[in-house]
Image: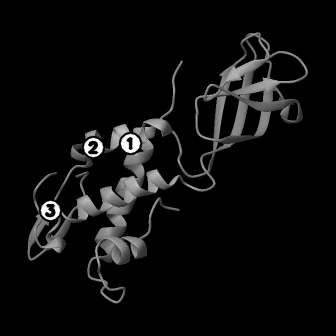
Amino acid sequence: MSLTTRAIIKSDWLNIQALDTTSDAMIDRIIAAVDAEIVNICGQPIEQTSKTLTIMGTGTRWLYLPWTAPLTITAVDEYIWPDSTPAVLTSNVMVSNIGGLNRAYRKDGTFVMGYQYRVTATVGYATVPADVVLCANEMVVEVYNETAFSGDGSRLGLLSVAETAGGTAITKTLQALRPKIEKRLLPYRVVTI
């Protein structure tokens, strides 16, 4: 899935008829680049996806998880040694969110110091927040407007999105848009402790 779609960009933002497919491939590449850039800015998934990580036990009842986006723990395995057979703890672990930080909370004991815990979780928003979608739409349009397809391209520069139009290859860099978008995505950025 993407944070936006070609159909929305063409109809709502660029006023391009659905039957006009001349810029479809370029718009699709721009959408993919913008999706990756937003995930990179936020440092965590925006759309729901499965993530797995291994964390060392802390000797406490909780493990801090690196994501601030909504999450559901789907599996927790405890390893005494890295190559040992795991003990499945999934039913005894729940998510605890305190001050925007997600923690895996063990109901039946502690996460033993020195043991390894493999946590698998579904991380991200079931419905992407409207302001993130708006940022994605604006970024796609800004990038598109810099291409030869828009008629007045080459004002700024984007992430190796290249297209040949009239014999001219256009390469841009998304980094120029970062300062404009980062502040608006702050609520969705990962928090490190």
Q: Amino acid at mark 1?
A: Arg
Q: Are marks 1 and 3 in contact (CB under 8 Å)?
A: no
Which residue is the extreme one toward the right? Answer: 108
Residue 83 seen: no
Between residues 45 and 179, which one lies in front from this camera angle?
179
Q: Residue shown at 71%/33% (left/top)? A: 119
Label 1 crowd bin: few (<14), some (14–19), many (20+), radius 10 Å? few
Write down the quadrant of residue 25 in the picture: bottom left
Residue 98 lies, in percent from the top left, at 67, 25
Q: Residue shown at 35%/39% (left/top)? A: 182
Between residues 114 and 178, which one lies in front from this camera angle?
178
Residue 67 seen: yes
Helix, strand or loop under label 3: strand
Q: Are marks 2 and 1 in contact (CB under 8 Å)?
A: yes
Residue 21 lies, in percent from the top left, at 31, 84
Q: Amino acid at mark 3?
A: Ile
Q: Amino acid at mark 2?
A: Lys
Residue behind mark 1: 184
Q: Tell me which label, 1 or 3, sits earlier in the chain.
A: 3
> How far apart in space, not on screen, are marks 1 and 3 (Cα)?
28 Å
> How far apart in space, not on screen, are marks 2 and 1 (Cα)?
8 Å
Relative height, residue 81 to residue 35 (above, below): above
Tell me: 124 left or right of 60: left
Label 3 crowd bin: few (<14), some (14–19), many (20+), radius 10 Å? some
Residue behind mark 3: 170
Q: Residue shown at 37%/85% (left/top)? A: 18
Q: Residue shown at 74%/27% (left/top)? A: 104
Count every numbered label the image shows and give the total.
3
Write down the quadrant of residue 143 in the picture: bottom left
Q: Are marks 2 and 3 in contact (CB under 8 Å)?
A: no
> How far apart in space, not on screen, are marks 2 and 3 (Cα)?
22 Å
Residue behind mark 2: 180
